[in-house]
Image (tube, helix red, strand yellow):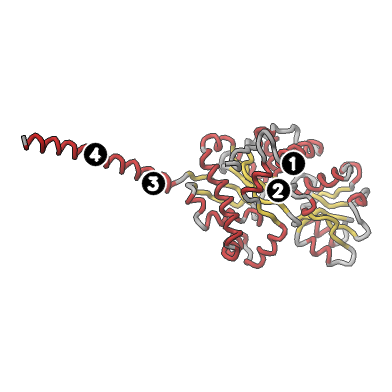
Amino acid sequence: MLRKVGSIFLVILLLIMTGCSGETSTEAQKETNNKKGTSFSLGVATWVGYAPLYIAQEKGIFKKNGINVDLMKMESNTDRRTALAAKRIQGFASTVDTHVVSAASDVPGVQVVALDESHGGDGIVAKKEIKSLKDLKGKRVAVQTDGGASFFWFLYLLKQEGMDFNKEIKAQNMTAGDAGAAFIAGKVDAAVTWEPWLTKAKQTDFGSVLATSDISPGVITSTIAMHEDFIKENPEAVKALVKSWFEAVDYYKTNKEDALEIMGKAMGQSPKEIEEALKGVRFYDEQKNKEYFGTKENPGQIYELSKMGAEFWKGQNLIQKEPNLDKLIDYSFVQQ
């Protein structure tokens, strides 16, 4: 009888051990998977507005949220767009109007989170006798007319004034940096440019800053667009990316000195230099993202600007068709 009871006890003990062993193995596998995380690459330019991404990388925020993100520096929008189309990267950061061009070129990028807006970092410099945008009529204006945020912003401002760019402006096609230099050299009447050319214009005896981007909140805004296939296959990874951005911006707010060190190193600047550069930028935290995106039923400013970008670029023959805006924006990740 005792031998029978002992046998039963042994069987029960073995079953318990087997059960525990299986549970431990499963938990260990889960832990291994979480440590490994989902790996993907983002194309980013050397722009201070993207700098909190490096906080997320340096402080282990990406890893904590279960993702491994390779931040690939790619200065050209064209290079980033081509890489996304070929799936060499899974997403890239750029301005809203740039993502419109990508979508119109059948590159399936979907905007999932807003990063920052230019808040005084871009501007229009002009001769002192030019007092308003309407005074630019018939004047030589240096601006990058083959696309980009500066041109989009300029078209936006002209529209607000009821002006027609093609009929009323004598445009000189130049990059923002070259435009600023051309103005300082006295070769044009005005230029759409950015720092340090805004400051340089004020230092001349003939120039002034006519307008800066802080008069148009949300117009020059950068977002991350992810490849639609990646979103479908890895929604949790995209959710983690958005969450990581919010946490990185919060870290900047609460640990400014350390954040400036990290961001400055990533941008090749001293903490003091990047702090100065950040005066012209506003980061988009979770609350601002919710306002900017809105919902599919009640879209925010991002939809309006995407639609405007499509109209502007088609009007300038920079795209041949307007993209499907419903596919260009995913409202769900910022509302998580």
* Observer-nearest of 94 and 259: 259
Disc 2: CA contacts within 10 A as few (<14), some (14-19) or many (>=20):
many
How far apart in space, not on screen, are marks 3 and 4 (Cα)? 20 Å
Give x and y (percent) for residue 235: 53, 38
Which callout, 3 or 2, points at the residue further toward the start of the chain? 3
Which callout, 1 or 4, points at the residue further toward the start of the chain? 4
Q: Which residue is mark 1?
A: 305
How far apart in space, not on screen, are marks 4 and 2 (Cα)? 56 Å
Which callout, 1 or 3, points at the residue further toward the start of the chain? 3
SS at badge 3: helix
How far apart in space, not on screen, are marks 1 and 3 (Cα)? 43 Å
Q: Is residue 311 above or below residue 219?
A: above
**Does any portion of residue 179 appear in the rendered image?**
yes
Q: Which residue is mark 3?
A: 31
SS at badge 4: helix
Give x and y (percent) for residue 196: 76, 62
Which callout, 4 or 2, points at the residue further toward the start of the chain? 4
**Does any portion of residue 79 appear in the rendered image?**
no
Q: Please state which amino acid type lies under the numbered disc 4.
A: Thr
Q: Please state which amino acid type lies under the numbered disc 2.
A: Thr
- Which callout, 1 or 4, points to the residue nearer the camera? 4
Q: Please state which amino acid type lies under the numbered disc 3.
A: Glu
Quadrant that contains the N terminus: top left
Picture residue at 49% right of the left edge, 48% below the top: 65
Mark 1 vs 2: CB contact within 8 A: yes
**Does residue 235 appear to the left or right of 288 in the view shown?**
left
Q: Which residue is mark 2?
A: 221
Q: Which residue is mark 4?
A: 18
Quadrant that contains the C terminus: top right
SS at badge 1: helix
* Observer-nearest of 17 and 84: 17
